[in-house]
Amino acid sequence: MAPSDSKDAVELTTPSDSKKKDDKKKNKDELAIQPDSLSEEDKELKERLETCVETVSNDPQTTLRLNALQIMVTELRTATSSMTSVPKPLKFLRPLFPVLKEAYKKLPGSFSTASDVDNEMLLFRARLADVLAVLAMTLTPTEESPRESLKYKLAATQDHAKLKDSEMSVDDNDTGKEKDDNLGSWGHEFVRSLAGEIGQEYNARVVNDGADPETDEPFADLLTMVKSIVPFHVSHNAESEAVDLLIEVQRLQYLLEFQDMIDETNSQRICLYLVKTADYMSDPDDHVEMLETAYEIYRKQGQFFDALRVALRMSKEELIPTLLQEAAVDKLMRRQMCLLLGRHGISHEIEDLDDDEEMELLNDLIGNVSLHEQFAKLAQDLDVTDAKTPEDIYKSHLAETGGFSRSRSAGGASIDSARANLASTFVNAFVNAGFGHDKLMTVKEGEGGSGESSNDNEWLYKNKDHGMLSAAASLGSILLWNVEEGLTQIDKYLYSSEDYVKAGATLAVGILSCGVKNDADPALALLTEHVEGDAHVIKCAACTGLGIAYAGTAREDVMEVLTPVVETSGGTVNQTMMEVSLAGLA
């Protein structure tokens, strides 16, 4: 590289550098006006606006100045109502912003709460401040004036409020609505820009001025404008922007004040945005407030199922009776809500219905009494009722090591591995969970393949110790939720001479009864005696079974069974920790 002081040094530029410079220049001059490129219509508009600015700045008669300003207001409102490109009135008026700004400063009572001016001057001052707010939106913020658009709009809002209080008479040439602070008439882009500056100003007052966010007085002017912007956003399908603004100013409860603008359509968008955004709230109070707001909107819109989902997410089970009572007008929705409660494992009992048959049905839905039948019907509709083997999952025939076969006549001698058998037990339990049958543990006589006699003990005794325990416990997963028929098949293992088989059977009883309410309480009746037994492995399995069967129910009778075991535990540290954990489950 040549020295900087060399006369022969040549500056090299790449095409990309030139392009970047051209882009910057283009962006900088985006609003610049090229006189030669203007059409006759544009030239006429430019001259008319410049004449209006001259009149507004220098004419001594307020009436003429007001008429000229009204022309500018009309042009700007018409141009900014749909801002797909930079409107021409903004381009023409933007260079004249300093002139209008200086004219506003010379007005009596500008940027003050003084009311010693007549109504005509108030109207002129309010409209000029509106124009300056719109023009300031196109300017780059500076350190001296970081939020000029908001500053002028706040001043205009104060003047509009004074005009409204004074009930100013409107002449025949005025439309009547311009005396009000019609925020939406300036277009969506202006409202969006204003909402961003409101959030910045709110944070500045809290951080720099030490304003208390819990009180409204330091932010009265901002909150007044917020209450105008939120309905505008909600009515123009910008619900997420309305929620964002309310979150910025920590006034999410204001959303509930606009229930007349929230209907079945936009309530779904609002609540979905609230529920999804709540996950990103670092403050727990903000998280709860967003969910509570979504809950109230859902409930007032009659969407009780969605309200119940939010209530369960907040862990407020005390709201369940109220929602079920309000949903009485729609029986199908109430039944769906009971299914949801059953899916979440909520222990709730309905007792105040006049229709005994309907009350029993709802309690059965909450207790998952018919869950096995519903699952079997779904499997039948999907045509997936056939039992699968671990080999269907392994697909080891695609590898060089051979495949899985339960039958001894499958060709060649198969070598059983304790680890492989244990893995197959778990795979078989999960892949056939809830179907009620499989090809390892529930095989009937004569179903072993190739006419060979087989029974359901064959696979069990291919395992040892904990493998036998797992194989017996897998019956609970295979027969999941089918308490009546499942207990019949598991019962014989409870009387086995092998402690590990008996332990697996007690665990199977707990898995089988998980989440299913039964008036007979078979899990508690069968496992209580084993909890008090002497065999360590059976005792641990019985405690585990009780913990799984009654998880989340807060049943005192179950705790009475498990608590003495924890208090008198003389086993290892691991055993004691497991017993405490299982007591916590129940």
Image (spheres, rainbow, N blue to C red):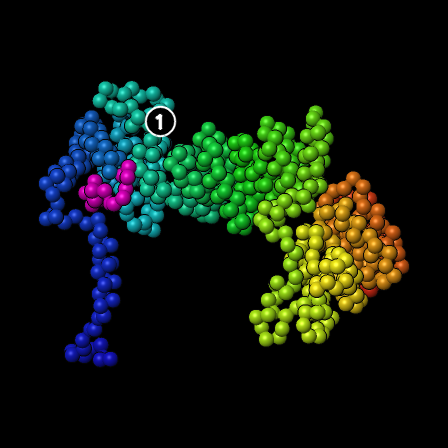
Q: Is residue 93 magenta?
A: yes
Give residue 363's quadrant in the image. top right
Q: Name the one closer to the observer, 463 or 78.
A: 463
| Residue 141 in view here | yes
Q: Position of residue 497 (x, y in %)?
A: 88, 61
Horizontal and vertical percent for residue 6?
18, 79
Is 269 magenta? The answer is: no
Which residue type does callout 1 highlight?
Lys
The answer to whether one can see residue 254 in this image is no
Q: Residue at x 86, y 59 (%)?
A: 496
- Residue under the point 17% across and 35% down: 52
197 and 270: which is toward the camera: 270
The quadrant of the rendering that contains the N terminus is bottom left
Residue at screen point 59% across, 46% down: 381
| Label 1 crowd bin: few (<14), some (14–19), many (20+), radius 10 Å | many
Residue 443 in percent (x, y) is at 74, 58
Q: Is 191 drawn above or below residue 431 in the view shown?
A: above
Residue 111 occupies which quadrant of the picture?
top left
Secondary structure beneath dot 1 equals: helix
Query: Residue 223 versus residue 401: which sits nearer the camera?
Result: 401
In the depicted structure, whether residue 354 falls above or below residue 414: above
Seen in the image, is 212 located left or right of residue 134?
right
> Looking at the picture, how far across and down is residue 316, in whole percent?
64, 40
Q: Residue furthest right?
A: 534
- Judge by depth and name the residue closer to the eye, 68 or 569: 569
**What residue would you read off at disc 1?**
162
Count of number-bearing discs = 1
Which stretch appears magenta? 80-96
Q: Residue at x 82, y 64 (%)?
A: 572
Q: Toward which corner of the image does residue 40 lie, by quadrant?
A: top left
Q: Residue furthest front?
A: 451
